[in-house]
Image: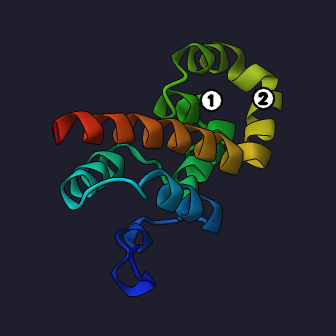
Amino acid sequence: MMNDLNNPYFSFPGITPEEMHLLQQATADLSEAQLRNFNMFYAGKRKNPGDILLLTLLGLVWIAGIQRFILGQTGMGLLYLFTGGLCWIGTIIDLINYKSLTNDYNRDMMYESYQMAKRAAN
């Protein structure tokens, strides 16, 4: 088990204790090589909650739905784009829920990165 001073997850901007705990649980059975691959894959895919908040705020004054495109939700992004963030209501809801939107995305990327790391080391 990694000690906290050498934990590579601390370098992720905006990481929450919940995300840290999930990462430690998900990667507990990985070898050192697999863990390096996982960190490389996950760092490239992970989104910072602060960035999603900023993009959602931009949706109120500029182009609605950018945060949904960044989170891989193309259909919702197009819907927000063409409806002005569902008349701003959807964008306001996203402002409230930006952390859960980001956490859901990051959780999916964690599982995907885990599978990639397992396959890469074989």
Q: Residue furthest bottom?
A: 5
Measuring from the top left, give residue 44's x and y in whole percent. 30, 47
Q: Kindly check if marks 2 and 1 are in contact, taking CB atoms under 8 A apart as contact.
A: yes
Q: Residue at x 50, y 27 (%)?
A: 69
- Where does label 1 land, which residue? 64
Residue 87, labelled with which disc?
none
Q: What residue is pinned by disc 2?
A: 90
Which callout, 2 or 1, points at the residue further toward the start of the chain?
1
Q: Amino acid at mark 2?
A: Gly
Q: Secondary structure at mark 2?
A: helix
Q: Nearer the viewer, residue 27 or 41?
A: 27
Residue pictured at 81% horizontal, 37% vertical: 93
Q: Is residue 62 above or below residue 54?
A: above
Q: Along the horizontal axis of the image, is 20 left or right of 64? A: left
Residue 108 image offset from top left, x and y in percent? 51, 35
Query: Residue, x 56% and y 55% (percent of image)?
Result: 22
Residue 84 in the image: state x and y as whole percent: 70, 22
Circle 1 packing at 10 Å, graded few (<14), some (14-19), many (20+), is many
Q: Quadrant of the C terminus?
A: top left
* The N terminus - image quarter: bottom left
Would you say 104 lies left or right of 45 here? Answer: right
